[in-house]
């Protein structure tokens, strides 16, 4: 960020709560590196105030907003337009200023895709296991089907929730690739090949770091790559078990990084270089170590 003056542009985050966000570190670092006169701040928005917040932001000439829990669905009704993938997922986390209103994107999923790509992980044609059937797992399942995965086993403790998502995603993406399953039925997943597994439950999140949705090593023998959306702790039990069975494992901090990088690119019409993204990543890691999250 340069000195705040009459030309300073504003971006921000709306949600409730927003106090623990690491997004200001991402965007204010990118602004500084790129010499942009832009400031990013969190806005705590109360229940029932989302429409007013979005309309007010537009009236104030705010360049862009991120949206976090619990407003990623509700905000869609306040937009001029929604990107196709975000519309199918039904969740928007980035608003980009356009003529007459904001356009919504889901850079969480675009960011996950870019983060995985940066580690050489593909979704196209892959056989994938998704753990969970909450909001995060739902978006991940959409992303996998959208990118034409060959197969997605969707495992959840509560089968009905996995069934509902499978039905929805298969219908929306014109596929039959998503197969719902109870988590404890993982033994039915064919063991003659190996899978990418994406951990999208809240299990294993700090401070309950010794928890994992599946503890059975026979499951981890089937995993070539484990991707946990959790980034605190930096090595979850799921990641540790994946590594013990010989697979590669990643946490979700790069997903957080790239959802921010992509939002910044959309707001400013630029491409952030890999070097700059890695500088921001360093800041995020420092923030994690200092406990600012
Ligand atoms: P988010 O929106 O972050 O995805 P969520 O909607 O609360 O969060 O979903 C949490 C997910 O973690 C669900 O899949 C949940 O399983 P259920 O649908 O059966 O509740 C899963 N989860 C949470 N605690 C769990 C536990 N102790 N064991 C197994 N799964 C758990």
Image (tube, helix red, strand yellow):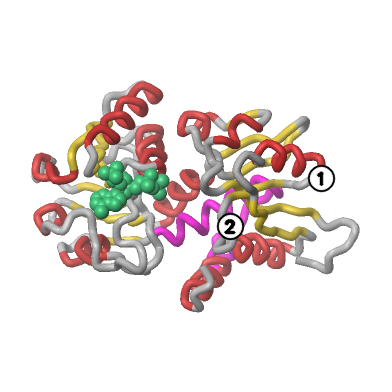
| Residue topped by disc 1 | 60
Q: Name the N-terminal-most of marks 2 and 1.
A: 2
The answer to whether one can see residue 136 in this image is no
In the drawing, what numbered circle is on residue 81? none
Q: Main secondary structure of the magenta part?
A: helix
Residue 205 image offset from top left, x and y in percent: 35, 62
Query: Which sits in the foreground, 217 or 122?
Result: 217
Reply above or below: 79 against 43. Answer: above
- Magenta-drawn stretch contains 261: yes
Q: CA distance from mark 2 to mark 1?
A: 20 Å
Disc 2 + disc 1, Cβ < 8 Å: no
Q: Is residue 36 left or right of residue 286?
A: right
Q: Is mark 2 within 8 Å of ligand 1?
A: no
At 76% from the left edge and 64% from the top edge, which residue is drawn? 35
At 69% from the left edge and 59% from the top edge, which residue is drawn? 41
- For disc 2, the neighbor class at 10 Å (few under 14, some 14 to 19, many from 20) is some
Disc 1 on helix, strand or loop? loop
In the drawing, what numbered circle is on residue 18? 2
Which contiguous range is marked in magenta? 252-278
Which residue reaches farthest front? 47
Residue 56 image offset from top left, x and y in percent: 77, 41
Reply above or below: 173 against 271. Answer: above
At 13% from the left edge and 45% from the top edge, which residue is drawn? 184
Query: Which sits in the foreground, 112 or 69?
Result: 69
Reply above or below: 131 against 35. Answer: above
* The N terminus: image quadrant: bottom right
């Amino acid at each position: 960020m340069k000195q705040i003056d009459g030309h300073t542009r504003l971006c921000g985050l709306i949600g409730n709560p927003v106090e623990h966000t690491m997004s200001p570190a991402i965007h204010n670092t990118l602004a500084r590196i790129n010499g942009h006169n832009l400031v990013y701040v969190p806005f705590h928005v109360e229940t029932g105030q989302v429409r007013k917040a979005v309309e007010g932001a537009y009236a104030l000439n705010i360049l862009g907003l991120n949206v976090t829990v619990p407003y990623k669905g509700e905000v869609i009704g306040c937009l001029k337009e929604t990107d196709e993938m975000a519309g199918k997922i039904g969740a928007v986390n980035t608003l980009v200023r356009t003529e007459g209103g904001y356009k919504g994107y889901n850079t969480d999923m675009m960011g996950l895709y870019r983060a995985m790509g940066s580690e050489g992980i593909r979704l196209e044609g892959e056989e994938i296991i998704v753990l969970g059937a909450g909001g995060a797992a739902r978006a991940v399942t959409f992303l996998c089907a959208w990118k034409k995965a060959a197969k997605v086993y969707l495992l959840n403790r509560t089968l009905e929730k996995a069934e509902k998502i499978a039905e929805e995603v298969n219908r929306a993406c014109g596929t039959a690739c998503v197969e719902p399953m109870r988590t404890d039925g993982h033994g039915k997943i064919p063991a003659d090949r190996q899978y990418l597994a994406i951990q999208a439950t809240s299990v294993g999140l700090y401070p309950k770091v010794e928890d994992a949705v599946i503890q059975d090593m026979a499951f981890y023998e089937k995993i070539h790559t484990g991707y946990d959306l959790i980034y605190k702790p930096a090595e979850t039990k799921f990641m540790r078990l994946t590594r013990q069975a010989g697979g590669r494992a990643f946490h979700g901090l790069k997903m957080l990084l790239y959802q921010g990088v992509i939002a910044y690119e959309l707001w400013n019409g630029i491409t952030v270089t890999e070097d700059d993204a890695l500088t921001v990543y360093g800041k995020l890691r420092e923030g994690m170590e200092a406990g600012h999250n």
